[in-house]
Amino acid sequence: MKFTYDTGIRRKLFSNVRLCGSWDANGRHSEKWSERPMREAIASDGAVVFEADLELQPSEVGKEFFWTVLHDGPLGLDREGIVNEQDGMGHDALHRKFWLTDDPRQEERYYLTHVRRLGARKVRVAGSDEPGLRFAVWAPNAQGVEVVFGDPKHGYIADDGTGIDPGRPVFVLEKREEGVWSTGPEKEAALRRFRDFAGAPYMYRIKNEDGRVVYRTDLYSRAQVGTGDKNPEGKPYQGTPAELNGVVSCSVVVDTELVQADVSPGADPKAVVSEDEFWRDEFNHLTPFPHRIDDLVIYELHVGSLGFGSDRPGNFHDAIALVDYLTELGVNAVELLPIAEANGTRTWGYGNSHHFAIESSAGGRDLFRHFVRACHQRGIAVIVDVVYNHYVPNGERAQWHYDSEREENNVYYWYEGKPSDYPSPDGGYLDNLSTGFAPRFHDEMVRKLFISSAAALVMDFHVDGFRVDQTTSIHAYNVVHADGRPAGGANLAGAKFLRELSRTLRLLRPATLLTCEDHSDWVLVTEHPDGAGLGFDATWYSNFYHNLIGDTGRGPECANLLKTAGMGGNGELAFSRFAEILATTKRKAVVYHESHDEAGNSEHSARTLMVAINADGSAPPPTGDLRRIAEARVRFVAGMTLLSAGTPMFLMGEEIGATKDFTYDGFLEKREDLLGERQGNGRFLFRFYRELIRLRRRHHTFATANIEIMLVHDADRVLAFHRWKGPEHYIVVSTLRDDGWPEGYVVPVPNDAQGKWREIFTSDADVYGGSGVTNEETLDVVEGKLNVKVPARGFVVLRHVPQT
């Protein structure tokens, strides 16, 4: 029999690949596994595969065998190449199993990814130098599947078939293993030339389990028609392709191995280069590039909120134009809100449908590649926010009822039991505190959809990492829709999915940066996936935000520092509570004083500059002395974030004092003029951010987990903490007192850092719009303490002067 290990990717990453299994050298079942080399080959779709032949004795027919693959690769030597866990066997069951039959054609095949397995793919054609086209779709419940092509003048096929291009043939797909239907040039002569179909709109015409004909998009498509919001809702459509919402429009045949050479307005879209040529000058080796989560300073960016002054959402042209601004600011990572094809244009992107397709209204796949390359050339890593806890709610042409209208066979959705078990047919779906029902994570094909899309972002787009949205919804929050019963099996399957995701990405690119939004405080979230861990480098630490800012209506259990300070007065502040939170930032955390969720979108929330004066986005921006007070408090909270032991992040616009509410449905009307404000009202804050970021990146001590609270006093509104690495010592002394401590405040120093200290940063510098409160050139330790001048609503950073 034959064994195949299909990587699903073109890049050659693995060597010394071996097949290991529960048989001996004589082809008999054995508890002691043996191994044999696998030969490398290139599949017709261009994927690197490894193959081996094995003879098992006829006497072993009917027995159960296990097998796996070992290889050397980016992650190291003798690494397991199979990342999927056997159902019900736990996190360490990384192998496949089969029962031997008497069929001489029996074959075992494992797909590491489905990057090239499904969708409309360019393939090698026997006897021809020109590539052909293959279609493949997973539809296990379908009675029949065809590919039909849409009229390119409209890009939409109605439920009655209106919109099908009569000039294109209809291709019938054949059902193969695992419910995959496919056809290609070996069956259809018309598919022997890929170039005849490049750019063509298409859909799958499916005869579903119930015998009804439905039209479905390709969930593995690399592009969707349309850059607009129009949903014809299944009716005939005579408008232009550009007006369409990509969630419901036709999919597009795309050559993924070519990139538009020049994406500037008016450039020839047919002038293309190969992937290899495009990425050749990706990095400037004189510019440092971050590879560890600890080294990052993250700028959270929503592309659609760019394009100030235009009548359209922002796009990757605007993002590329912003790269020089980001470079000047000094951040070395940009985290993009979701960029997968999503529902409409007025969106943050969290209701997405086609995970392999880059949002068309943002410019699509080639423009995104140019953005990534521009960032990399300037030493900026690109992290993408991905949403795996639900699908777009109106995805009838995407995941919903893809090949069956029977709820229990709704293949992309988890369903408990049968519809007859509930008063309403939707009772068996799972809620998970997201905006849709939970995905069917017990099915490997569903898990592979998400995992393979992430692998494609790493391999094809050179994305450096991911922020996985609300992972608690995946592994902890699942309940039955009908009655709220906990769905423990779904939680276990969700955890398995997250382990498989991190294993796959680490296998392909060990330096992939993985963060997540997780509210479980589960220690295994950031443990290695070789064990039971989920494999993330860090989690978003929302408690840091709620205690530091406190504008979302949390109760007295949170410190609510900025919100309380913004109310005025010099009363007691809960610095002791915040100090506890600050001390825990060493626990693999992404910390932030503003993110997309809490900048006006959550109830009671507003931009940081407005919270600093107890106002919201409906109030006029502060001016004069009120602006000066607000900016001082903003500098304080930014300092707590950037000098903590976590990985710091902040939302776009914080660096210029954004004041408008940032909401999921109102961002177009409330865009901030980043470039204009950087030279105008926001110039002082921009310079402050730039120089504080530079301090953090220059002094590597701040990228360590070493942090110790030296002093906290609620009535005095003072907090001092110690950061160190080896012989280097730093102390941050801060206050939210309205008149500060200009005559000095006594703080202790570490026992091994006596002698002299020097101020290296003050948030109150004149160039930041401050009052200029600063300390002498050096401060002397007296009886283990320093007397430090602390500016109003600000902080200073002191560095120990080593004794010579």
Image: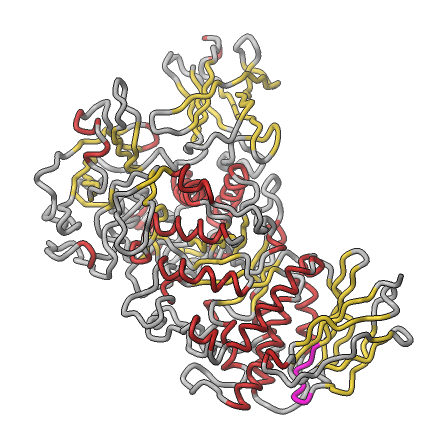
| Residue drawn at x 53%, y 23% as measured from the top left | 17
Which of the two residues, 97 or 480, is positioned nearer the viewer here? 97
Helix, strand or loop for the magenta stretch, by majority: loop
Which of the two residues, 62 or 537, is positioned nearer the viewer here? 537
- In magenta, the rendered stretch is 734-739
Tell me where residue 92 sits by quadrant. Answer: top right
Tell me where residue 264 sits by quadrant. Answer: bottom left
| Residue drawn at x 30%, y 50% as measured from the top left | 420
| Residue drawn at x 53%, y 89% as measured from the top left | 626
- Tag count: 0
Which of the two residues, 255 or 508, is positioned nearer the viewer here? 255
Viewport quadrant of the N terminus: top left
Viewport quadrant of the C terminus: bottom right
Q: In the displayed image of the protein, which residue is found farthest to the left? A: 166
Any part of residue 284 in sight: yes
| Residue drawn at x 76%, y 57% as measured from the top left | 725
Any part of residue 409 in sight: no
Query: On the rendered structure, is 54 left or right of 129?
Result: right
Query: On the rendered structure, is 196 left or right of 389?
Result: left
* 668 shown above or below 253: below
- Residue 96 in magenta stretch: no
* 133 shown above or below 449: above
Q: Position of residue 513 (x, y in %)?
A: 55, 49
Q: Position of residue 548 (x, y in %)?
A: 60, 74
Q: Position of residue 298 (x, y in %)?
A: 54, 60
Q: Position of residue 151 (x, y in %)?
A: 13, 46
Query: On the rendered structure, is 16 left or right of 434?
Result: right
| Colouring of the image | secondary structure
* 427 shown above or below 708: above
